[in-house]
Image (cartoon, grey):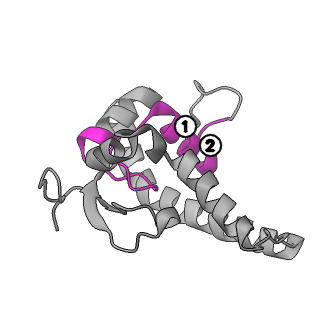
Amino acid sequence: MKCWECEIEGAPLHNHHPVPRSRGGTKTIPLCESCHSKAHHHKKNMNISELTKEGLRKKRATGWKPKDISPEVQKMGHAANKAKADAYMKKVMPSIKKYQAEGIKSLSGIAQRLTHDGVITDRGNTQWYAQTVKRILVRDGCLKKRNPRVINKKT
């Protein structure tokens, strides 16, 4: 599938609502990350924050009220998020270890290499940042939270 706007193929696509859902839109078009970003910043009234607020105002006008989430449901959500993050860490760590074995030791160097090699982040982005690499290494136990320069020799 390709981006509806720039027609690039192979890039991760986002389903964009030309008419926002909060304004009654139901149809979507596929846009790459760059075009999707442009679509939301084209008009001042089209940013995500304003659309969310508008949608919530409309829901509240119908009598809708947000429900409190029970501690049990919160724990289940936390556990699901943790499992997803752990699974992604296990998927990407072999690449990171390979880059380290090749002599790339800095977080930014690893991030640049992941970006260059087209490795997709857990959120579907193609751009990697040192902070993203740091979080994965901390999760794996290879890096201490307080001292990002200390990379343990964990195997």
Q: Residue at x 54, y 53 (%)?
A: 51
Could you say where residue 137 lies in the image, as x and y percent from the top left? Answer: 55, 43
State the residue in front, 50 or 34. 50
Occupied quadrant, residue 111:
top left
In the image, which residues are magenta?
A: 115-144
Could you say where residue 26 lies in the image, as x and y percent from the top left? Answer: 40, 74
Q: Residue at x 71, y 73 (%)?
A: 62
Would you name the residue on which mark 1 appears?
134
Would you name the residue on which mark 2 appears?
138
Q: Is residue 41 visible?
A: yes
Name the mark on residue 64.
none
Q: Is residue 85 above or below residue 143?
A: below
Q: Can residue 129 be found in the magenta stretch? A: yes
Amino acid type, callout 1: Lys
The N terminus appears in which quarter of the rendering?
A: bottom left
Residue 16 is left or right of residue 76, and the answer is left
Could you say where residue 145 lies in the image, as x and y percent from the top left? Answer: 69, 35
Q: Are marks 2 and 1 in contact (CB under 8 Å)?
A: yes
Q: Is residue 154 visible?
A: no
Distance from the alpha carbon under mark 2 to that under mark 1:
6 Å
Could you say where residue 70 lies in the image, as x and y percent from the top left? Answer: 87, 73
Q: Residue at x 30, y 40 (%)?
A: 115
